[in-house]
Amino acid sequence: MSYKNINKKCPTGIKELDHILGGGFDRGSIVLLAGHPGAGKSTFAAQFVYKGASEYGEPGVYVSFSESKKEFYEHMKAFGFDFDKLEKKNIFKFLSMISIADEKIVGSIINNIYGAVEEIRAKRLVIDSITSMLEAFTLKEARAFLHANVLLGLKPYGITTLLIADLPWGKETIGHGFEEFLADAIIVLKLDEKRGLTRRILEIRKNRGAPTPRVSYDFVITNEGIKLYVPLEASLSGGFTKERAPTGIPELDEMLGGGILKGSVVLISGPSGTGKTLISLNFAIEGARRGERVVYISFEEPRNQLKTAIRNMGVNLEELEKYLYIYSLSPRLFTPAALYSFYDKLLEKHKPSRVVIDGAYALARHYEEEEYLELIRNISLLSKAHRVTLVVTALSNIISLEEVGISTIADVLIALWFDISGGYIRKKIAILKQRGSWHDARQKELVIEDGKVKII
């Protein structure tokens, strides 16, 4: 029996990967999915077949040589994949296969797979893994078997097949080597350690369906499955408007021509102790007082310490907690991909109009400069797409010509520094840049009294 979907592309179920592949895999293709142990192969495959059945109306079959049906169903519930529900609708079948001992058993298994595909008119198939299936053969027999029974045997069904293969540590060749030549597309999942952080990397080694812009992407496994970290395009929607967002510091608003243009990315840069956090807190508190949702992320100070600082400013924090959401994060626990995914979820969850990222410089100590700049750039673009006014603090003295790599990303650049003269140490502030609006370019003195900021 032959049946085909008229759509040319078969979505993978991973939104970012579908965008990269121009819609997904070519329908009816054989995809080789290889990877290190624990890299996420089964999660990728489960997401592929689950999304296919639940969202695209494409029944699927999952063949496993390592997990029982009960174990698989329980593990996948952590990602919200309810395979039991799909099975009851007769749009999914799970085949748990015994250990393979000889060629006769393999032949029986292939017949069972064909039978399951016929029974539910499957359009997606996962075999987890072909490494186990081919162990019963010699190299020559394995190649002939895979070509005749899997590749040619499945073609009449027009079914998109995902073949999982193990990639041992330290090796680049998948399986016996010939598997790569028989596949239409090859996806490799790897685990890599950099600066003490374990990262998951997805490589697109081969794709006959469409060219890809780059070879590898960081990805994370969330409670909704796999999510790729893809650099955003500068042409995304959003940007600053003519409306103003008051900072909570009247003198600073005056210097800015009435406040920050909403939708701007603001960089506050200065040495430690110059008042970056206090200015940021004033901006966050002012937004909450106006009934705006505000997210405050700190990479340097504990959450309770920030709450104490707010109370020391004479603010009734309990009245603002409905609008102000404070997070204290450790950069050591996040890869750039994981942090970007976390930020994306915060925007979806709280839908803030203001966000503060205090202590972004802490990220620079844990990430390489290029990936740090790319992360801040992507967070800035994502913020603009969500119409968020973003304030970021960085530890550097621009006035002393210390370079701040993210300064070119910012729409507004506020410099803080110390001026030592006449035996006194004074804090200074100046607006170096504000796109789209006039600003006061004069340097002024910043004074902190009783937790409050004043500009003279």
Image: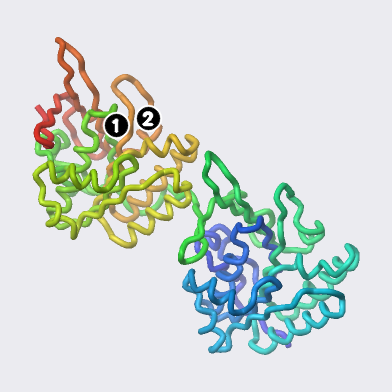
- The local secondary structure at tag 2 comes to loop
* Mark linked to residue 269: 1
311 lies left or right of 373: left
In the rendered view, tell whether residue 364 sits above or below residue 71: above
Residue 159, by quadrant, is bottom right
Pick whichever, 197 or 348, lies toward us.
197
Q: Residue at x 9, y 38 (%)?
A: 250
Which residue does the numbered mark 2 point to in the structure image? 404
Quadrant placement of the N terminus? bottom right
Res 196 seen here: yes
In the rendered view, tell whether residue 227 sits above or below residue 393: below
Res 123 seen here: no
Pointer 2 local density, CA inside 10 Å: few below 14, some 14–19, many at least 20: some
Label 1 near label 2: C-beta < 8 Å? yes
Residue 441, by quadrant, is top left
160 lies left or right of 367: right
Residue 60, by quadrant, is bottom right
Pick whichever, 97 or 349, lies toward us.
97
- The local secondary structure at tag 1 comes to strand
Q: Residue at x 19, y 38 (%)?
A: 279
Kind of residue sitting beneath label 1:
Ser
* Mark linked to residue 118: none
Kind of residue sitting beneath label 2:
Val
Across and down, in percent, residue 160 comes to: 67, 73
229 lies left or right of 207: left
